[in-house]
Amino acid sequence: MVINIMEIKKEFSCLSKNVLCASKTINIDTSYQQTLESYLDDIYKIIKCSCHSYVTSCDVIEENVVISGKTKICLTYSNEENELLFAEFLEDFSEKINLDGVSSSAFASAVACDKYCSYRVINQRRIDVHTTFQIAYKVYDLQSTAVIDKCSSSKLNTVEVNEMSVENFVISRIDFEEEASLSASNDGIKRVIGFDTQIKLVDEKTVNDKIFIKASVCVTAIYTNNKNEIEKITHTFDVSKIFEVAGINDNSKCFVELFEGCLYLKAKSYSDNTNGKIEIYGDIYAAITVLDEVKRKIITDGYIAGYKTENKYSNYNCYANPTLYEKNAIEKFSIKAPQPIKKIDSLWVNTIQCTKKGDKLIASLCVCVIYENTNGEILHINASREMSYDLSNQSFLVLKACMNSFDFNIIDETTVSINVDFNIEGCTVNEYDLTVLSDIDCCEGLKNSPAVTLYFAKSQERLWDIAKKFSSDIQLIKSENDLNDDIIQSNKVIVIPGI
């Protein structure tokens, strides 16, 4: 039983931050049956079928993570006259994942990653499309730990910790409309038969609860001209928007990951069948992770000189010493075509995922190629590559990759060499458990405490531990022994003054 023999005044505070309480990657396998619109020709041969799934919202509702998104299916095919056509379909998806024991303050982040797409022709008007994609989600909840903040007549050991934690996550949409005009020497435009997109973050600025995002969007469209020949055009434009995001302040660091939403391209010919333009409209999405940096003074221990005390401690999970991680990666690899290559009509490389597995950082790349073989047939290749990098044993709060540039060369009749340049960015922290002082009570006064005690101190021993052990005072010990540091540098006998 604790007997308070002296009145001590105590003040408490609460160490609070959002901590990761759940993290998982789930696979989604879905099949769709799609029917061509009435104005489109029948399917004679499919050149390319691709699926792109993306998350449009992620919320924690009544102890469930509710993730919603869309899957866009793009189909390039030829009709019986060997003309190339393009069809696209849009489907919604929703996933509900049960959570146990989260508070009303919990929130979640989620991103989708395309993995696999296959198709089966049912008849000339219908196809069965099967797609597999992953959703990586994380759930954050508020962790609070009560600690002593002030205590009269006591000696308190304080450590300073610079912490970073995830404050918020939002997914927001940017809509746009653009036009890409063909050159005067162009032989007109018949129809768009496919496209690829690369999105880069150009600028971001934050003020209280707001973030300005500017992005560069590069769209490469392949189309057929009036002679039914395949050509391509690249159009780059900027989009920007100001988003309302709760939790952003002067100390916030925002990580913005941009990804393609739903894009539509429409060919417009001029009356004289020359030149023309392509209308581009749709949306891109910004996944915004808000990190908050806080400098904390945390009391880890305490005692009252001349008295026995009873202390209570708690564990506090600390995310200390945040460091921005940046890596520029330049890689070279090759892919093989199943048939001899006469001409490459389109080649595109995207980073689709960046994750940490053990002590390795894995960046996944997806390559899409449309080419003509020596018989003039149009063929398609999908390939993926994983790049692995050694990484020290650090915890990542956030991690992303962004493609800078790529180029390619045809090495031989079936081999394409690809050079890529991309950036990997993140924020690492030193994660550890810190013992903090949650309460302190005075039990009884020390009896027959000596005026002076000789103590054999060991190298690297803390003066705090010595002072607490003998219920003395650090400054008095320093003064009596002519010490400047809080840590004993070598084995030595020191004088411990009594109080």
Image (cartoon, grey):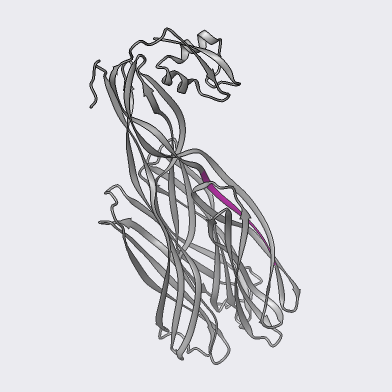
On the image, the x and y values in percent for residue 425 come to 56, 49
State the residue in front, 446 or 72. Answer: 446
Residue 259 versus residue 188 in the image, above or below: above
Which span is picked out in magenta? 418-428
Extreme residue toward the right, this view: 412
Would you say residue 270 is visible in this rendering? no
Q: Is residue 345 magenta?
A: no
Residue 185 versus residue 119 in the image, above or below: above
Extreme residue toward the front, this view: 448
Seen in the image, is 169 located left or right of residue 325? left
How many callouts does the rendering have?
A: 0
Name the image quarter holding the N terminus.
top left
Q: Residue at x 71, y 82 (%)?
A: 340
Main SS category, magenta section: strand
Seen in the image, is 498 located left or right of residue 195? left
On the image, the x and y values in percent for residue 172 come to 40, 55
On the image, the x and y values in percent for residue 60 come to 31, 55
State the residue in front, 126 or 84. Answer: 126
Residue 386 versus residue 109 in the image, above or below: below
Residue 35 versus residue 72 in the image, above or below: below
